[in-house]
Image (cartoon, rainbow, N blue to C red):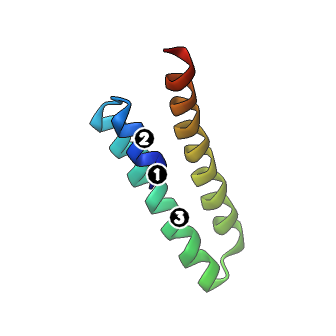
């Protein structure tokens, strides 16, 4: 949630921020459901995709912080 606040304060468009955060939340929920039900391949896929989204958000924040 901290990254969401920082990304929003940096002036990223609401559409991009919403797409990233809703996708991240949906994938984390999917990971939890797959964990409880023991669905192994989908659990890993949802975890990795959520991780990629988080890395993208952190790169946007890092670029904004150091580029100007």
Residue 33 found in image quarter: bottom right
Residue at 33% x, 29% y: name it. 11
Quick one: label 2 or label 3, which is nearer the N terminus? 2
Q: Are marks 1 and 2 in contact (CB under 8 Å)?
A: yes
Measuring from the top left, give residue 42's x and y in whole percent.
64, 66
| Tag 2 residue | 6
* Viewer-closest of 54 and 8: 8
* Viewer-closest of 54 and 11: 11
Q: Is residue 21 above or below residue 58?
A: below
* Viewer-closest of 5 and 54: 5
SS for tag 3?
helix
| Tag 3 residue | 28
SS for tag 2?
helix
Q: Residues within 10 Å of mark 3 (few under 14, many from 20)?
A: some
Q: Left or right of 8: which side holds 33?
A: right
* Viewer-closest of 47 and 68: 68
The nearer-to-camera label among 1 and 3 is 1
Residue at 38% x, 53% y: name it. 22
In the displayed image of the protein, which residue is found farthest to the top?
Answer: 68
Residue at 48% x, 54% y: name it. 24
Measuring from the top left, give residue 20's x and y in whole percent.
43, 44
Marking on residue 2: 1
């Amino acid at each position: 949630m901290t990254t969401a606040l920082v990304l929003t304060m940096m002036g990223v468009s609401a559409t991009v921020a919403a797409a990233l955060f809703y996708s991240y939340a949906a994938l984390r929920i999917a990971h939890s459901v797959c964990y409880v039900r023991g669905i192994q391949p989908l659990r890993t896929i949802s975890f990795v995709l959520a991780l990629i989204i988080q890395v993208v958000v952190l790169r946007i924040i890092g670029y904004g912080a150091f580029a100007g």
